[in-house]
Amino acid sequence: MLALQIDQFKAPCFDQDTINPSEAEKLYQLKAYLNSHFLTTCSLTQLSRLVLLNEFKLKKGFKQLFGVTVFSYIRQLRMEYAGLLLRDCTMPVEEVSERLGYEHPQHFSIAFKKYSGVNPSHYQRSKVQY
């Protein structure tokens, strides 16, 4: 009995959390898609159909592979884009908010401040890259 238990410890342990190569390729394709379509509103169901992975594998695999959730990644891309617009353009905050798809500029301001630590108008005035 003891010998069997020792053999179990010696046996290679397979990590069930590993991503197989075909799933990893699909997740990289999704990331490339998101990089160019981050302003498009989409659901997890739509994204999972796009890359032919079920929602669970998409969520878990994306987080495991890239260290961030799908929607956190989209939010990060949008906030970086907003920062570029605010810093490099003379576009008013309201227009940036609208371009990013926010119905109310206040919601954009709250999200931007949470992301960057400063409100959009201050960020725009300072022209400093955060």
Image: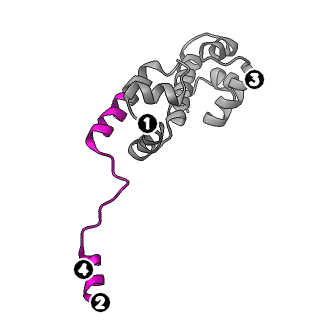
Dot 3 or dot 4, earlier in sequence: 4
Q: Position of residue 60 (x, y in %)?
A: 45, 45
Residue matched to label 1: 54
Q: CA distance from mark 3 to mark 4?
A: 62 Å
Q: Position of residue 15 (x, y in %)?
A: 33, 59
Dot 1 or dot 3, earlier in sequence: 1
* Secondary structure mostly taken by the magenta-highlighted segment of the chain: helix
Which numbered disc covers residue 7?
Answer: 4
Total labels drawn = 4
Q: Say whether residue 62 is left or right of residue 116.
A: left
Magenta highlight range: 1-29
Q: How packed is label 3: few (under 14 Cα within 10 Å), some, or many (20 or more)?
A: few
Q: Position of residue 5 (x, y in %)?
A: 30, 83
Instruction: Determine the residue positioned at 26% across, 83% down.
Output: 4
Under mark 2, the amino acid is Leu
Residue matched to label 3: 106
> Mark 2 or 3, which is nearer the eye?
2
